[in-house]
Image (cartoon, rainbow, N blue to C red):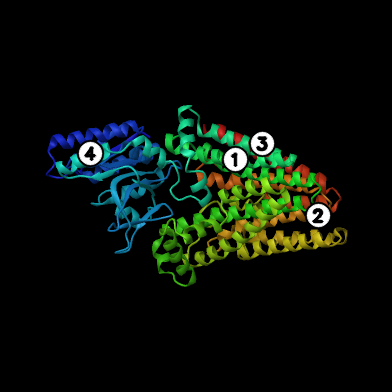
Amino acid sequence: MTLAVLTPRTGRDMPDSEADRLAGDLTAALRAAGVTVIDRLAPGSDEGGHLRDLARRARDAGEPLLICADNLVAHGSLLWTLATEPAGRSTVLVAADPDGDLKEDRGRVIPAPPGAGTTRFLGAMCVAPADLPLLEKAADQPEPLAQMLADGFVPVATRVRLLHAEQVDRPERLAAARDAIAAIDEDKARLRLAVKEQDDFFTTYAVSTWSPWVTRTAARLRLTPTAVTGLSVLFAVGAALLFWQASRPAMILGGILLYLGFVLDCVDGQLARYTRNFDAFGGWLDTMADRAKEYTVYAGLAAGADRMGLPYAWPLAITAILLQTARHMTDTWYGALHDEAAARPAPAAAAGGVGARLTAASVKAQSQRGSLIYWAKRIVVFPIGERWALISVLAAVSNGRVTMAAVVGFGLLAAAYTLALRSLRALSMRVGVLHTVDTMRHRDDGPLVRSILSRVGAGRPLPFAALFTVYALAAVAVLATGDPARYPWLLALVVVPVLVTGFPARTRHGGALDWLVPAALRAAEYLVVVAVGLYGSVHPAVIFLLLFTLTLRHYDLTARMEKGAPATGAGGALLGWDGRVLLLVLAGLLGYATVGTVALAVAVAVSFTVTAAKDWKASR
């Protein structure tokens, strides 16, 4: 970051010497935060015109602009935090205030209805390049932020929390603010602030109570967050190998390693926040490593149980990877939908019905942090901390089959709960989100859909995707319970839902529930993989391998979007879901199901690896 500006806000009662000293302190803090060019606007100047010119300069350079009131007294770490937002999003400095005119929603700042404010703006914000046109438009306003929020600006909230910041207008308030800052151990506070404020139950009480010590040690050893991520992968792979060995001592040691690996998984993020060492590659790698570790552990548990002669272990692992990936797809797109609704508060606020009441109840529960209902709502969604805790404990005292059965059981309950509530809430929001991105890329459409089928442009996307999922699930159920050789027509007829699901690919995916389309397509494709495997008597481990490579392909798409990572090569999917499904079905009908499954797994893995490597090399 290179550009920042100090706007005139010091009051008449502030002597010039104190105002200049305060501006000097802010300038030093901004330079420590990595800002190289700092302008200070003089009182009485054309503030709007200067601000607009600076916004244009920043936009032309493709860089953010940090705006800070010159009467702000704050810990330097807060300005550093503003200047180093990990995903390159706009962010504003705020403090909790029941009389404020703003409020937070999922970590974003939005205007509050009269009397409903919870947050106060503290005069500093960092505007990302994409939002600079909004700043140019609002530059002449007395309070540009208010106008920007009215125009759809939805910045991230940077809250003061354990540190201190306030705007001052008199010498006595300036002295008191400086005393308040001096009374706080800034480094200790930063270390504690590196821990997520609202985390899951297990993470909060079994990890975050002591992980800051590991974070500080890692920082002193000059480890990077990426290096810590690599260590967590090694721990998880070690746990998977021990689960595969399947003896009681190995299972116990595997559970311990898995827990320690999860601690390191938390530490990499804490280290990034503590040192402000962020980059898009690190965020992407963390997401991809989390999923790869978890699914490797599933494979280790299933292989160990199979080695002991316990049936149904691999089918349970296959069910778990399919279910968890579909759930993660809904998490991604529901989060994007919620953010889109926050950017358009009027339609969402005007909505009523069950969904609106559920949303209000959820907000109320979130405000009761630490209460029984708060933790119940956090646990019922079966987040990663609870999943890894369950796996660690059950693996140590039972076997891989019992552990995977528990993961599937709790996963199904969580999926039913979240899908039902989120669908009702989405209906009340009355906004769409999938049409705001490259829809066919996130659908993972291949050349067949992109170039031919989508030109039909008929139908609504969600019903067809859901129909495809239901058909694939029915095929799996029939082939799993009967003689697969009797039902070749079940596979042959897959071509019908593939065709009709491709027809609406170019139509607007702006429906209230269209955010479910990517998850439905993922589930349908994975179920077809299972159906072909059942028909062709493919070993379940080989089926799991193909599903594993496909999940990496699909997590790559969502992780790039969430982390603001480059996507230059990720849109060119190898075949796409449509081509992969049809080729795999053809291989199964011709009697080459195992060969086709292995070949497709290798092709997807190679394509994903090469594309990711090229993109990240180009972005460095």
Do tag 1 and tag 4 residues touch (Cβ < 8 Å)? Answer: no
Q: Residue at x 30, y 40 (%)?
A: 54
Q: Earlier in the sequence, mark 2 or mark 4?
A: 4
- Helix, strand or loop for disc 4: helix
Q: Earlier in the sequence, mark 1 or mark 4?
A: 4
Q: Give the side of residue 14 with respect to residue 421, left or right.
A: left
Instruction: Give the residue type that dot 2 points to.
Output: Leu
- Helix, strand or loop for disc 2: helix
Q: Give the side of residue 32 with respect to residue 386, left or right.
A: left
Name the mark on residue 534. Answer: 2
How many angstroms separate mark 3 from mark 4 (CA)? 50 Å
Name the mark on residue 289. Answer: 1
How many angstroms separate mark 2 from mark 3 (CA)? 31 Å
Instruction: Give the residue type that dot 4 points to.
Output: Asp
- Helix, strand or loop for disc 3: helix
**Residue 342, image x and y in percent?**
42, 58
Circle 3 sits on which residue?
238
Q: Which of marks 1 and 3 is nearer the N terminus?
A: 3
Circle 4 sits on which residue?
179
Q: Earlier in the sequence, mark 3 or mark 4?
A: 4
For this rendering, which residue is in front, 305 or 7? 305
For this rendering, which residue is in front, 328 or 512? 328
The mark closer to the camera, 1 or 3, is 3
